[in-house]
Image: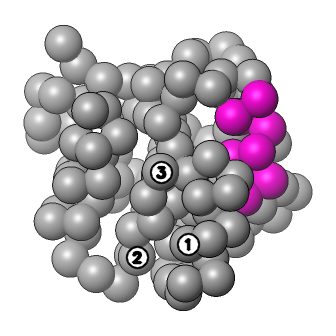
Amino acid sequence: MSHRILIVDDNKLIRHLLRSWLEQESEWEICGEAENGKVAVEGVEELRPDIVILDLQMPVMNGLEAARQIRQIAPQTALIMFTVHSSEQLLKEARASGIADVVSKCEMLSEHLLTALKRACA
């Protein structure tokens, strides 16, 4: 059974790279993409993904606010933040917003994101 993922990042290239990388695994199905938090919330309502990968800094609505809204409308959806920003404070805010894990874009993508996705599905 594949897990449906919504990719949310204001950078089209990042969305494309994540999609290409994740689609190599039969375990993951990309059900959609969004360029900001507002579109992500709408996408969750429509697509009902199992997992949402969120960027932190985006126009219109940032990843933390989107996570709070997603948590209210789809509490069963796993949330992972994928960002260039990484700090203990962000981790605390992310967890308070319902985000299961924060993965740095600067770290080894394949190791950390894959681990976070598998934890989110467990």
Q: Is residue 101 above or below residue 72?
A: below
Residue 99 location, x and y as percent? 56, 51
Q: Which residue is mark 2?
A: 104
Residue 86 location, x and y as percent? 51, 84
- Name the residue rendered at 12%, 27% in the picture: 26
- Name the residue rendered at 21%, 53% in the picture: 114
> How busy is the neighbourhood of tag 2: few (under 14 within 10 Å), some, or many (20 plus)?
some
Image quadrant occupied by the C terminus: top left
- Name the kind of residue labelled 1 in the image: Leu
Q: Which residue is mark 1?
A: 91
> For the residue labelled by badge 3, is the local secondary structure a helix, a strand or a loop?
loop
Residue 27 location, x and y as percent? 16, 28
Q: Is residue 119 above or below residue 81?
A: above
Distance from label 3 to label 1 (Cα)?
A: 9 Å
Q: Nearer the viewer, mark 1 or mark 2?
A: 1
Q: Nearer the viewer, mark 2 or mark 3?
A: 3
Q: Earlier in the sequence, mark 3 or mark 1?
A: 1
Q: Which residue is mark 3?
A: 100
Q: Would residue 16 appear left or right of 47 to someone viewing this image?
A: left
Distance from label 1 to label 2 (Cα)?
A: 11 Å
The reply to whether residue 36 is visible in this rendering is no
> For the residue labelled by badge 2, is the local secondary structure a helix, a strand or a loop?
strand
Numbered mark located on residue 54 in the image = none
The part of the chain drawn in magenta is: 63-72
Image quadrant occupied by the N terminus: top left
Residue 28 location, x and y as percent? 25, 30
Q: Earlier in the sequence, mark 1 or mark 2?
A: 1
- Name the kind of residue labelled 2 in the image: Ser
